[in-house]
Amino acid sequence: MTNNIETHLSKNKDILIYINGSLHRRQDAKISVYDSGFLMGDGIWEGLRLVNGSWIFLDEHLDRLFEGLKAIDINLPMSKNDVIAALEKTRAANNMDTNAHARLMVTRGEKSKPFQQPDLSIDGPSLVIILEHSDDAKPTKGITLATVPQVRGLPTSQDPKLNSHSKLNCILACIQAKKIGADEALMLDPHGFVNTTNSCNFFIVKNGEVYTSSGDYCMNGITRKKVIHVCKQNNITVHEKNYSLVDVYSADEAFITGTLGSLRHVINIDGRKIGESIEPGPINTKLKRLYLELH
């Protein structure tokens, strides 16, 4: 793990970071300690992948970003084209063309006082873009999951469809999983059905058919949506429905999906071996190929 962190830092130590129209060296990139995102986790973010000069599924990512901003009443004084221009400015300044990942963050901006009230923001929203090298071509080993007490909750508490800066619930879930030696947490929904991991959407395969949660309590993942699409386009039966840990433990395959990692196979859940080997299963392998062809 230490070597991986050191390699990542080495590759990205000289990047330029976009902050409200200006570019700053990594070591000089700063926002106010009064920024709403720092004080309260008050903001929306989006992850984007850059492959061969193109931002993958850019329109859908920006639609989700602006949907989230509208939901929490942040009025970013930029159009989608303006945001694209900011992304391109950051990409050009860093001379990146492929195998890169952007974290695009919008907060309610700097506050006059360190309190919750949204109207204390004095200068309007802040936009930050971090673009880093990421070795997407490198093979990834299977991961392990552990079921945790934390759940992705009801929309009446914090809607899990919001890609908000406030991720404490998921961070606590990840801590629980790490404490018992797993890579990520498997989180249930408020009714006890299998939902998602702390950072990715979750799928299982049984008897050649693909299962994922109903979607009511998880992030509306774009990679998740694309995997469901390629299943339907290629005569692979896919179910969006409630299912339990009993179904998970007897699965033939399991995998997680997300923008940065695309599809990554799961080899162990709560101490139960998933699949016949530590390599990706046949359905996972096929779906990853079909997904990458969408790029």
Image (tube, helix red, strand yellow):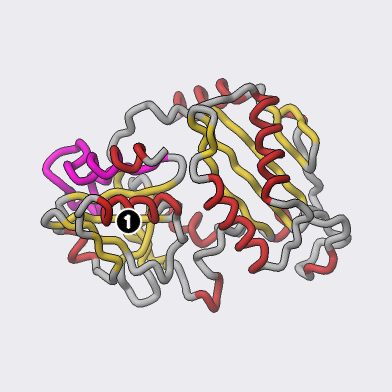
For residue 229, side relative to residue 90 (left or right):
left
**Residue 142 or residue 280, whichever sits in front:** 280
**Whole-percent x, y for residue 23 in the image:** 77, 32
Q: Residue at x 64, y 30 (%)?
A: 91
Which region is colored magenta? 261-288
Residue 58 found in image quarter: top right
Q: Residues within 10 Å of mark 1 (few under 14, many from 20)?
A: many
Q: Is residue 9 left or right of residue 70?
A: left
Q: Under tag 1, what secondary structure?
A: helix
> Could one spot residue 5 in this view of the protein?
no
Left or right of 262, for residue 79: right
The residue closer to the viewer here, 15 or 186, is 15
Amino acid beneath label 1:
Ile
Tag 1 residue: 228
Tell me what residue is drawn at x 73 percent, y 47 percent. Answer: 127
Residue 266 percent coordinates (x, y)? 27, 46
Residue 14 visible in this rendered orientation of the protein: yes
Check residue 32 for magenta coloring.
no
Q: Is residue 292 above or below residue 154?
A: above
Say left or right for 105 vs 256. Answer: right
Q: Quadrant of residue 295?
A: top left
Q: How many marks?
A: 1
Q: Which residue: 54% across, 38% down?
A: 55
